[in-house]
Image: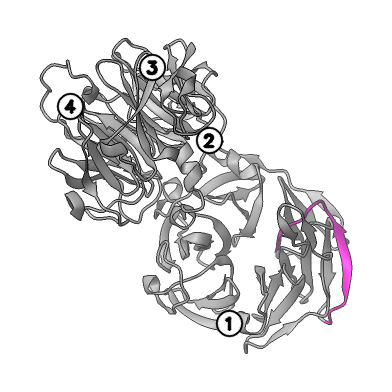
Amino acid sequence: MYRRFFAALSVILVIAGCSGGGDAGTNPGAGAPPPAFSPTTLKLVAGSIGGSGNLNGTGPAARFDYAAGTAVDSAGNMYVADFTNYVIRKISPTGVVTTLAGKMNQSGDTDGTGDNARFGSLDDLVLDSKGDLIVLDGPNLRRVTPAGVVTTIFVAWTQFPKLTISRIAIDRNDNLYLSNTYSRQIYKVTTAGVLSTYPIVLGSPHTLAPTSGYIYNGQVGIAVDAAGNLYAAEPVQNRIRKIAPDGTATIFATLTEPRSMTMSQDGTLIVSSGTLVSRVHADGSATPVTITAGTPEAEACLKSINLVGKDRSENLLISTGPMLCRVVNGITTVVAGAQLEFGTAVDGAGVAARFQYVGGLTQDSTGNIYLTDGESLRKITPAGVVSTIANSIPRGHGIVMDSTGNMLAISGDTIVKVTTAGVVTPLAGNRAGLLTDGVGTAATFNSPAGITVDAAGNAYVADTGNGAIRKVTPAGVVSTIGANGASFSLPSGITIDSAGTLFIASGNSIYKVTPNGEVSRLAGSDNSGYRDGPGSQALFEAVRNISIDKHGNLYVTELYHRVRKITPSGEVSTLAGQDGKQGIQLGTLPATLDAPNQIMSDADGRLTISTMGAVLRIE
């Protein structure tokens, strides 16, 4: 999913970029390095490791991009339309998640078996009387057998150019019903593949909003009962419409913003609306369904309820997107997947802690980690206890510990000094955002992201928006460095070795800048991709941050879920993460990752990494 919208979010990712602070290799006065450290394991330091991904596994170890629809067969196997992973997933009764059809992150419309098939936009699915899945794939209908054989049964786009189908329902005779939100109509598809339009327009005329364009006010969810009556949820009108087989429509029930619906075996319509679930009876009256979380992890399923179906025992199935829950006797528990918890800072130990967005990492001599998190300076003890020191670093990004035990940090378009008590003093820059050298506030930066420091206390800043590397002296004198004013394409990470050589993470390459300002490419190329190997033969995909150990090995995070290692000779290998796999799976390396951002090497050679919601360690 990240790959598809990276270009649109590049500015955001740059601003939320990376620091090279806290590296063990930044002190030229350090003694002889210890024997090389060989990391073997990925561990959690603090935070939440859930969220979107594409991992198969059991229960909470699995990852979904967005579970858009479900169906359950007579054996209790659950099938999931995994929206923009472009695959159909299967969950066994014991919670084992596998991929039935399609190939992760590869879209298309090819028929075939298993991972040879391709899907374009998986919005919903139903199970027919033969045990085959009928899948709503954008404007098309596809059939998927229990063996994973995919065929196209109907291409609706050729007849309805503006077909925007959001939901699908099936009756006892295997007739299909498609909800087209754009046209505010419902279509019927017979078992012979004949498509017809119900003689009713639902919802209200679409409106044009000044900032967001058209607002489609049509129906969303649909359901069908045993007598062939259709039910359409019209959230803008706060009602559910009942449509008889002859097309006659009546207002069946009034309910606040009804969206997803499913029909129970006794004819009761079950409807989700925001954080509520209601049972709508034959007379149109509604009874709220009380649902409570059976585990702390299941709390996420109650924050915004998206009803995606029911199992063979009539238990409700709820999707949060990356997580599926089941409701049994009013108690919900997690079936598979895990929710990412972040955005609000919460102090605590280990998994109890929460982060907003980690902008930079550094570490003191006793092993305490300091990080910028939103506007806060936070601390993680060696035991994993997270506390907030101060809320005094607006738009905090890169941070680095200097030789005096104080820190230098990026705060918006400025460089500030920070004590371990959270006292902030401006050093250089203002909020103008232009490339200007000078002293203190006379100098300007443009969305700087990474920062590192030498033994003399000089800071070096990856000035991302200006495509430049800047030097900031302890007195706040700012200059631009690099041979002939060399520029970089969106430099995001920076670190320094004991000889004063800078290493820059920029685009899909790692650059080297000597103390006399000579610039060369150490590894990577102008091309994006994934390949280990020497120097320019190696390929990277959107490098983010960089760190160095005492042996001169560099470690680079990539947006696409990997940590790469570069030896002093430029040989590139993969340390953590696996190509094509998204989602955090702890344990033996290479493990798997989800968009690692910050990275820091400590004196023992261990690596600390930040992701969207967690701080991890490779050791």
Disc 3 element: strand
What separation in Å lies between label 2 and label 4 (alpha carbons)? 33 Å
* Residue 583 drawn in magenta: no
Asked if the residue at tag 4 contacts the one at tag 2, i.e. Cβ–Cβ closer than 8 Å, the answer is no
- What is the quadrant of the C terminus in the image? top left
In this rendering, does residue 619 appear at all? no
Mark 1, residue position: 155
Mark 3 vs mark 2: which is more N-terminal?
2
The stretch of residues the image draws in magenta is: 246-262
* Up/down of 375 relative to 311, above or below: above
Q: Looking at the picture, which amino acid does disc 2 mark?
A: Phe
Q: Looking at the picture, which amino acid does disc 3 mark?
A: Met
Mark 3 vs mark 1: which is more N-terminal?
1
Mark 3, residue position: 407
What separation in Å lies between label 3 and label 1 (alpha carbons)? 61 Å
* Up/down of 86 relative to 480, above or below: below
Q: Looking at the picture, which amino acid does disc 1 mark?
A: Val
Q: Looking at the picture, which amino acid does disc 4 mark?
A: Lys
Mark 2 vs mark 4: which is more N-terminal?
2
* Residue 259 drawn in magenta: yes
How many marks can you see? 4
Q: Residue at x 54, y 30 (%)?
A: 432
Residue 46 shown left or right of residue 541 in the figure: right
Of the two numbered discs 4 and 1 in the rendering, the one whose residue sits closer to the viewer: 4
Disc 4 element: loop
